[in-house]
Amino acid sequence: MDNTHFVLLGDIVARTEHRYADVIIDDTGTVTSWRSMMTALLGWTAEEAIGQRLAGLVIPQELRAAHA
């Protein structure tokens, strides 16, 4: 497995300039908490993200099969 996605997410978090870009997921990968900085980074509002699987929000459609 390559670490491209981890590097990308690390870069995104670094660009928040230490503002909190937290997302909390449960043991099934479902989003239970979504801070506003995540909206600024990824475009999904908390209302849209909470209850969704994190992978579906952050992994591009064409790469999802590799992460299933």
Image (spheres, grey):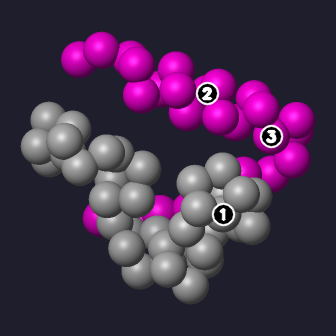
Residue in the image at 55% along x and 68% along y: 44
Number of marks in the image?
A: 3
Tell me the number on the disc at residue 16.
3
User: Element under label 1?
Assistant: helix
User: Element under label 3?
Assistant: loop
Please provide the residue range marked out in magenta: 1-29
Q: Residues within 10 Å of mark 3 (few under 14, many from 20)?
A: some
Which residue is the site of mark 2?
Answer: 10
Quadrant in the rendering for residue 43: bottom right
Residue in the image at 19% along x and 42% along y: 62
Where residue 67 sits: x, y (%)?
20, 40
Vertical side of 5 occupied by 64: above or below: below
Tell me the number on the disc at residue 1.
none
Vertical side of 67 occupied by 4: above or below: above
Vertical side of 58 occupied by 7: above or below: above
Say if the magenta span includes residue 53: no
Q: Compare marks 3 and 2 and give the one earlier in the sequence.
A: 2
Check the picture and name the quadrant holding the N terminus: top left
